């Protein structure tokens, strides 16, 4: 093929294309297409609405607030005290 690249060590890099088909429900496909056309701020709003709509059955880790270091060290201290006591 004309797109193949020959190396000096005698190997040839061959480009191959693999096509994979999967079936998804139409509603899932349409929601996915809508998400891809949204800006990042709009996607964040949709994620927050999903959390509200599902009654917090599904939480997005990317929406969680970062824990401040003081609270983190306090929690780690509690865990280490529990493990030392055993």
Image (spheres, helix red, strand yellow):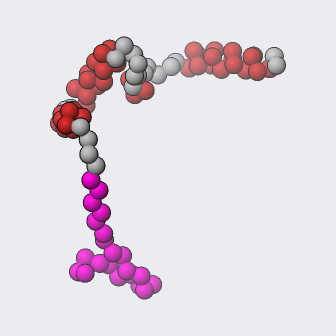
Residue 4 within the segment the image draws in magenta: yes
Locate residue 69, reporting x and y percent: 56, 20
Residue 43 within the segment the image draws in magenta: no
Q: Is residue 27 above or below residue 18?
A: above
Quarter where residue 70 is shown: top right
Residue 46 in view (yes/no): yes
Quarter where residue 26 is shown: top left
For the residue pair 33 and 41, the one nearer the viewer reads as 33
Q: Residue at x 81, y 16 (%)?
A: 85
Q: Quadrant of the N terminus?
A: bottom left
Locate residue 2, reporting x and y percent: 23, 80
Locate residue 60, reporting x and y percent: 39, 25
Quarter where residue 78 is shown: top right
Q: What residue range appears in magenta?
A: 1-21
Q: Is residue 8 above or below residue 36?
A: below
SS majority, magenta:
loop
Locate residue 61, reporting x and y percent: 43, 26
Residue 41 in view (yes/no): no
Residue extending furthest toward the right: 86
Q: Is residue 1 above or below residue 85?
A: below
């Amino acid at each position: 093929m004309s797109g193949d690249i020959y190396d000096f060590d005698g190997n040839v890099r061959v480009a191959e294309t693999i096509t994979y088909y999967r079936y998804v429900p139409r509603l899932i496909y349409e929601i996915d297409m809508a998400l891809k056309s949204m800006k990042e701020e709009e996607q964040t709003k949709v994620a927050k609405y999903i959390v509200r709509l599902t009654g917090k059955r599904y939480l997005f880790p990317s929406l969680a607030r970062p824990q401040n270091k003081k609270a983190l060290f306090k929690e780690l201290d509690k865990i280490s005290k529990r493990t030392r006591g055993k």
